[in-house]
């Protein structure tokens, strides 16, 4: 079992959560300030099937507002039977009320991303098991919500996916707009190697078979086949691997849960889907105050 909580140390969570709370409560919570104060308990309830993601974040938010939580669940658990109480919080009623929407929003979004990622993995594994081929990595993209990248990429991990690069500093990715300023893909890779560490892989986004083969011959570590139809990819993968079998091939662009099975059979090493982070519907959570 993966210890997902280790990906979210308190020192990393603190400035992010404080920023979210300051956005929501820039001065004081005028809805809760007049409420007669007392200690209470409340349940956070999951109301539909989901892979849970975001419990360490919910715990941190409540703890920051001097509340304590208890739960028998952890991130990554698949919940089939709902409604279900996933955590109980105890503390001052006004603090719980102030934290409520932030906690529910984050749990809903992150659990949806984890669930979508898990579905993608299931589709690929089922398809590949029937064809006895290598299982491609399901990966996110950089199409994440500003301010939420850490949490959304974390949710992809919880769902069994790969984060892809986490920032522009992680990996060289020469996209079509970069390539417009070079004489050729070969020139781009040659110049890029002068500016990047040996620890950084070089990935090239390609839009044609000719570009893909040139990138392979020029020394790219990863070649992205962008917006290729599934029926065209298999042949290109074989040609790339003939040049250098160690090159990783990534399919991306226009891939979603409805057409993922087609791409899983093409022989690519990686399938990246922006849809698992930007086209999801929040999982339904609610908070119920106990009498």
Image: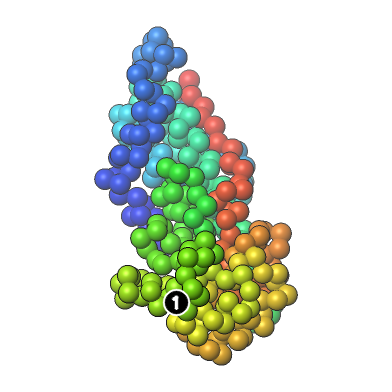
Q: Tag 1, which secondary structure? A: helix
Q: Judge left or right: residue 259 versus residue 26.
A: right
Rendered residue at 46%/60% (across/down): 163
On the image, the x and y values in percent for residue 203 come to 47, 71
Q: Of residues 252 and 32, which is closer to you in this image?
A: 252
Residue 88 versus residue 108: which sits nearer the camera? 108
| Left/right of residue 241 with respect to residue 209 in the rendered view | left
* Residue 260, horizontal then vertical, whole percent: 67, 65
Left or right: residue 193 versus residue 220 is left
Q: Position of residue 117 (x, y in %)?
A: 56, 57
- Asked whether, in this view, residue 189 is left or right of residue 276, the answer is left
Q: Residues within 10 Å of mark 1 (few under 14, many from 20)?
A: few
Q: Looking at the image, which residue is at 60% across and 86% down?
A: 239
Color encoding of the figure: rainbow
Residue at 45%, 76% in the rendered image = 187
User: Residue most toward the left?
Assistant: 11
- The answer to whether residue 163 is above or below residue 128 is above
Task: Tell me which residue sits at (58%, 41%) in the image.
Answer: 282
């Amino acid at each position: 079992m993966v210890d997902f909580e280790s990906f979210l140390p308190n020192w990393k969570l603190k400035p992010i959560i404080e920023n979210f709370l300051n956005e929501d409560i820039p001065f004081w919570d005028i809805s809760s300030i007049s409420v007669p104060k007392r200690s209470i308990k409340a349940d956070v309830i999951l109301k539909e099937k989901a892979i849970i993601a975001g419990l360490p974040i919910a715990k941190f938010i409540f703890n920051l507002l001097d509340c304590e939580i208890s739960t028998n669940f952890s991130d990554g658990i698949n919940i089939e039977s709902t409604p279900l109480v996933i955590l109980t919080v105890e503390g001052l009623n006004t603090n719980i009320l102030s934290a409520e929407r932030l906690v529910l929003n984050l749990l809903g979004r992150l659990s949806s991303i984890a669930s979508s990622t898990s579905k993608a993995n299931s589709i690929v594994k089922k398809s590949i098991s029937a064809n006895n081929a290598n299982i491609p990595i399901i990966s996110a993209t950089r199409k994440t919500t500003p301010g939420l990248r850490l949490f959304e990429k974390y949710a992809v991990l919880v769902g069994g996916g790969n984060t892809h690069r986490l920032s522009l500093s992680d990996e060289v990715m020469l996209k079509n707009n970069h390539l417009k300023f070079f004489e050729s893909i070969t020139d781009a890779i040659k110049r890029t190697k002068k500016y990047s560490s040996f620890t950084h892989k070089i990935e090239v986004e390609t839009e044609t078979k000719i570009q893909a083969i040139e990138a392979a011959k020029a020394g790219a570590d990863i070649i992205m086949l962008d917006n290729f139809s599934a029926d065209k990819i298999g042949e290109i993968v074989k040609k790339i691997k003939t040049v250098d079998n160690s090159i990783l091939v990534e399919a991306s662009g226009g891939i979603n849960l409805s057409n993922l099975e087609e791409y899983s059979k093409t022989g690519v090493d990686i399938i990246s889907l922006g849809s698992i982070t930007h086209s999801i519907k929040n999982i339904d959570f609610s908070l119920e105050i106990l009498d």
